[in-house]
Image (cartoon, grey):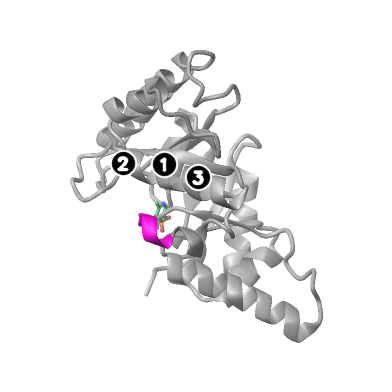
Amino acid sequence: MIKDVIYRLNNELPATVKLVAVSKFHPFEAIEEAYAAGQKVFAESRPQELLSKVKRLEEIRTQSGDALYMSDVEWHFIGHLQTNKLKMVLPYVSLVQSVDSIRLLAAIDKWGAANDRVVNVLLECFISDDETKQGLSEKELTEILSGEQTYGNIRICGLMGMATFTEDESVIRRDFQRLLDMQQVLHDWIGESRNVVPGCSELSFGMSDDYKIAVEMGSTMVRIGSMIFGERA
Ligand SMILES: *Cc1c(COP(=O)(O)O)cnc(C)c1O
């Protein structure tokens, strides 16, 4: 049961770790069930799917006449975001966890300026051996922090990373350590770079299969999908 897993995770996770329920590929009803168990933050990885769930919620509010139904729900975006899809995502999310290129960062900043919004983001770092995964290199991270370019309509809240898809725990730990090393780079720039401000200390790492290791290593945000909602179709 979705509810039971949410209760169990809330019991298990330290208060310093935020649970993000990854609802991608699951129907809106599954989100409602998790919400009924107290879960507020949900993450989606595809713009169209996020948008249709946001619209579905609006529709339910209209039909039921309950304008406040699930009014404190929060959406995060965790997938690869193309710059031509920003308007499908940015108006609805409280955090974009997956800023994986300088080009995307600049595009989000531009959107923020045009729409009078400051967009909360995490910089997604490439820490695994999987070439298919996205993410910034340490060089690109340093470039963002040290560069002339400033991003006035972005608030960098921290870093996100995904470990290699493997059962070898030592590899997972090595990957997570790479993220911690990149966080050190970020911290070294606090006060020096106009692009980071104190408090940018979120570290989003850990999924269904590796969240225990992540929590042990200092994660502040775990993104859990299949463990809560079951296998994705
Ligand atoms: C799908 C996804 C998750 C959740 O993965 P599970 O193994 O189902 O917990 C977490 N993070 C990202 C970026 C994802 O795309």
Foreground mark, 1 or 2?
1
Instruction: Indicate the secondary structure of the residue bearing disc 3.
Output: strand
Foreground mark, 2 or 3?
2
Q: In the displayed structure, does residue 118 sit left or right of residue 182?
A: right
Q: Which residue is mark 1?
A: 105
Q: Which residue is mark 2?
A: 135
Instruction: Indicate the secondary structure of the residue bearing disc 1.
Output: helix
Q: Give the mark nearest the N terminus, 3 or 1.
A: 1
**Depth order, front residue of 224/71:** 71
Disc sitting over residue 222 in the figure: 3
Q: Is residue 82 magenta?
A: yes
User: Of all residues shown, which one is farthest toward the front?
Assistant: 114
Residue stretch rendered in magenta on the structure: 80-85
**Depth order, front residue of 19/118:** 118
Q: In the displayed structure, does residue 125 sit left or right of residue 113?
A: left
Give how far apart the Cα atoms at labels 1 and 2 are.
12 Å
The quarter holding residue 56 reads bottom right
Residue found 50% across the figure and 50% down from its top:
111
Amino acid type indicated by mark 2: Gly
Q: Position of residue 163 (x, y in %)?
A: 31, 41
Give how far apart the Cα atoms at labels 2 and 3 are.
18 Å
Q: Position of residue 186 (x, y in %)?
A: 44, 22
Q: Is ligand 1 closer than 8 angstroms to the Cβ of mark 2?
A: no
Q: Residues within 10 Å of mark 2 (few under 14, many from 20)?
A: many
